[in-house]
Image (cartoon, rainbow, N blue to C red):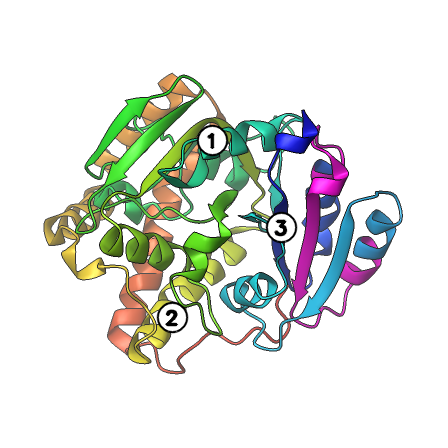
Amino acid sequence: MSSTLPFISIVIPTLNSARTLKECLESIRVQDYPAEKLEVIISDGGSNDSTIDIIKLTGSRTPIDMIVVPNPLKTGEAGKAAGLKHANGELVAFIDSDNILPDRGWMRRMVEPFGDPEVAASEPLEYVCRPEDGYITRYCAYLGMNDPLCLFLGNYDRYSAVTGKWTGMPYFAEDAGPWFKLKLDPRRFPTMGANGFIIRKEAIESCGIGDYLFDIDVVFELISSKPDVRFAKVKTGIIHIFSGDVRTFMRKQMRRVRDYRHYSSLGLRKYPWKSVDSMAIVRFIVSCIIVLPLLFQSAKGYIRRPTSAWLFHPVACWLTLAVYGFGAIRGLIGGELKREGWSQ
């Protein structure tokens, strides 16, 4: 019955997101979930494309409350924090503007674990894609991550066709049927918290969110301060559209590493990256140099998920090595990657 379903605040950061936002909002609009139990809060960083027009058009076609709030700091992390301040729901769902809910029953499946009072948050088990999606979208979906370095580090959080696992980090899981109930180790845990992450509002507010909300840091704070907290990995997927080409891939890699170092220098980041296996980084570098391990990984992925997109794996690894290596050598001069002119 709808009366027993929790109220959900869906927070979506946007900045020139017209390429993907329409499909994102449409997938929310058609959910088999009571409209009166949903609200959509879009925190916009000053879009100058048709993002706002898309929001207005979709809002006129649905009874779901849909509001736009300003995000003067422009970044996705700032947008999540800005949207959270306006959230009224018992649960908060962080869905990016390039996420598409794959079917009408997605929201109901994702909230089912919250019937267990120990569960603080839920997240889809995998990325899924469509045949018509671009090759980078299909590659990242089947790899289970957007950054191939994470494959070597083991700290990914979606099913990978290369390893046949959803993470390389230690965890304890109970199989609850439609979902897994997880206990995580604060010293080494997967980078959970993005792309369809749903969390109890009271849990996230206990983390003391300021101007920025770094999703993996929220997970770290919860498992560090509350030993009994549990997370759910729901046996469903989410589509994560990678809109762009190789240049966009490089730009997003640069954004990731520059932003991390910038916010770390300000004392805002908490995820224990220093605890990662340094030898894994060495293996990544050596694999990029001799190439054969990358081809072997591509072949393993192809066996489980046959697609020509696996040809991009060696290229993605080389580009990642180049971007991270250049960043380390240059010291990432310039701090935070500015969002002027940014588009999805």
Give neighbour class at mark 1: few <14, some 14-19, many 20+ (Cα, 10 Å). few
Pointer 1 residue: 115
Q: Quadrant of residue 100?
A: top right
Pointer 2 residue: 258
Residue at 50 percent of width and 44 percent of height? 198
Amino acid type of the residue tagged 3 in the rendering: Ser
Q: Secondary structure at mark 2?
A: helix
Q: Is residue 15 above or below residue 162?
A: below
Where residue 41 appears, as percent x and y from the top left, is: 67, 57
Q: Is residue 187 above or below residue 255?
A: above
Residue at 27 percent of width and 59 percent of height? 271
First reached walking from the N terminus: tag 3 or tag 1: 3
Where residue 308 appears, as percent x and y from the top left, is: 48, 27
Numbered disc in front, either 3 or 1: 1
Front-most of residues 82 and 275:
82
Pointer 3 residue: 9
Q: Is residue 44 one of those drawn in magenta?
A: yes
Q: Is residue 62 left or right of residue 233?
A: right
First reached walking from the N terminus: tag 2 or tag 3: 3
Q: Secondary structure at mark 3?
A: strand
Give, as a single range, the part of the protein colored magenta: 28-54
Amino acid type of the residue tagged 2 in the rendering: Arg
First reached walking from the N terminus: tag 2 or tag 1: 1
